[in-house]
């Protein structure tokens, strides 16, 4: 261990910026191989410690709990490390390739389900030579991409019990939504193959339909925007199940003083699920929403519930859609059914709810114009878009064919 630490110390002081491109890539290849070898030894020791019930020495019940508490690993990573160690007990060829650095821990995790007790029993009952399966999978892991290894493993497992009961897809689905103090929502979950394919197809349809020129979003950002757009479409359609006698809507509560104050106003509004939003975000939602005024007494109790006022009536939205057709932000062109009706001069600040004061903007660009960007329609009817510094976003003319 001391020699390994010394070697890592030497690497840490190396001037990597002075290396050529080829030296960089060669070094990365070597480090990947070494990381695989270190991961293999870590997995081997974790398994040995589990068999010895070593976590009891630190007062912990399991190796997984020890890894979470002492190794500061997440539950999923700790559990997979333990499962990898158990699987490699029955896959010596894969364990050898792992120890040599030819296979990654992620690849071991893909193969690990092959070695569960129930599947080893099924293989034995069918006369399958698990040693041969082990050698084949080790070769595939060492020579092919992980996607190909995944398909090979799935092919083997699906034929191991071809006549068994088809699993209920709902058993393989889970979704959790965790909300942080700033209102950010973290999505975690998994879907079965069919459910996952449906979601990927729907998201890809949105992503590919909304690719404006100059789009610098990462793939992850595109997919996240697509998921929000799907929610927008569903909420706008009015076809969702009734929620406690009312159709589901995004509900935001904000004091009138914060709503009418042009300042950003951090943490001024509260959503129905308890998240905090800025006044600027609340005003953005109010652009194409409904407003219900409620008078509150000095004790915070409601005194009077005013009549809900629809900011953009349906007939006006139809007129705006007919005129604009798509999102008017330069370079976008998202379809009208993805868009909100934005007040060029916000109605809170005296802007009229009229055709002349309205513009179609998709959710992404609606957010942009509430954070410094600006769109305006010139006398000739052409939409123009300006950055926060006042410079105009000009779309380059198409090259002649």
Image (cartoon, rainbow, N blue to C red):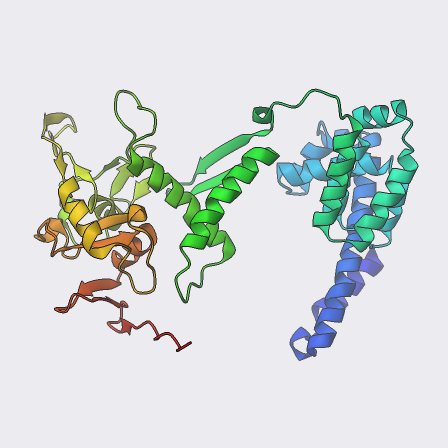
**Residue 304 % position (x, y):** 9, 27
Q: Quadrant of the N terminus?
A: bottom right
Q: Nearer the viewer, residue 342 or 22?
A: 342
User: Residue 111 occupies which quadrant of the picture?
Assistant: top right
Res. 293 visible in picture: yes
User: Residue 243 occupies which quadrant of the picture?
Assistant: top left
Residue in the picture at 55% in, 34% down: 195
**Residue 375 % position (x, y):** 22, 63
Residue in the picture at 15% in, 28% down: 299
Query: In the image, 291: left or right of 123?
Result: left
Query: In the image, 133: left or right of 76?
Result: right
**Residue 184 % position (x, y):** 40, 44
Query: In the image, 325: left or right of 26?
Result: left
Q: Nearer the viewer, residue 316 or 140?
A: 316
**Residue 255 % position (x, y):** 17, 40
Residue furthest to the front in view is 401
**Vertical placement of residue 215 versus 334, above or below:** below
Res. 98 visible in picture: no
Q: Nearer the viewer, residue 143 or 391?
A: 143
**Vertical placement of residue 276 versus 356, above or below:** above
Residue in the picture at 70% in, 48% down: 147
Number of dots carrying numbers: 0
Q: Quadrant of the C terminus?
A: bottom left
């Amino acid at each position: 261990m001391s020699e390994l630490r010394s070697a890592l110390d030497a690497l840490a002081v190396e001037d990597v910026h002075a290396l050529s491109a080829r030296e960089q890539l060669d070094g990365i290849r070597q480090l990947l191989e070494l990381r695989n070898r270190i991961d293999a030894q870590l997995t081997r020791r974790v398994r040995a410690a589990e068999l010895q019930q070593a976590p009891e020495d630190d007062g912990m019940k399991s190796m997984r709990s020890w890894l979470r508490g002492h190794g500061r690993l997440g539950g999923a990573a700790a559990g997979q490390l333990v499962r990898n160690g158990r699987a490699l007990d029955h896959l010596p060829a894969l364990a050898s390739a792992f120890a040599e650095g030819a296979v990654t821990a992620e690849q071991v995790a893909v193969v690990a389900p092959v070695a569960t007790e129930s599947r080893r029993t099924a293989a034995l009952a069918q006369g399958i030579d698990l040693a041969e399966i082990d050698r084949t999978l080790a070769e595939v892991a060492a020579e092919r991409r992980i996607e190909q290894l995944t398909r090979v493993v799935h092919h083997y497992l699906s034929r191991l019990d071809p006549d068994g009961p088809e699993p209920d897809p709902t058993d393989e689905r889970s979704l959790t939504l965790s909300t942080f103090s700033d209102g950010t929502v973290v999505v975690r979950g998994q879907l079965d193959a069919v459910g996952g394919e449906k979601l990927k197809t729907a998201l890809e349809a949105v992503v590919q339909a909304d690719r404006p020129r100059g789009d610098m979003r990462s793939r992850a950002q595109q997919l996240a925007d697509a998921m929000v757009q799907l929610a927008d479409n569903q909420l706008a359609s009015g076809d969702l199940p009734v929620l406690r006698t009312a159709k589901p809507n995004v509900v935001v509560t904000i004091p009138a003083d914060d709503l009418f104050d042009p300042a950003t106003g951090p943490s001024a509004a509260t959503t129905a699920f308890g998240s905090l939003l800025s006044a600027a975000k609340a005003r953005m939602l109010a652009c194409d929403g409904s407003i219900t005024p409620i008078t509150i007494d000095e004790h915070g109790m409601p005194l009077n519930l005013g009549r809900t006022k629809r900011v953009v009536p349906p007939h006006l939205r139809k007129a705006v859609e007919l005129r604009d057709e798509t999102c008017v932000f330069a370079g976008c062109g998202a379809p009208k059914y993805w868009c909100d009706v934005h007040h060029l001069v916000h109605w809170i600040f005296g802007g009229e709810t009229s055709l002349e004061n309205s513009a179609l903007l998709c959710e992404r660009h609606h957010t942009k114009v509430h954070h410094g960007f600006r769109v305006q329609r010139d006398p000739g009817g052409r939409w123009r878009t300006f950055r926060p510094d006042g410079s105009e976003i000009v779309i380059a003319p198409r090259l002649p064919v």
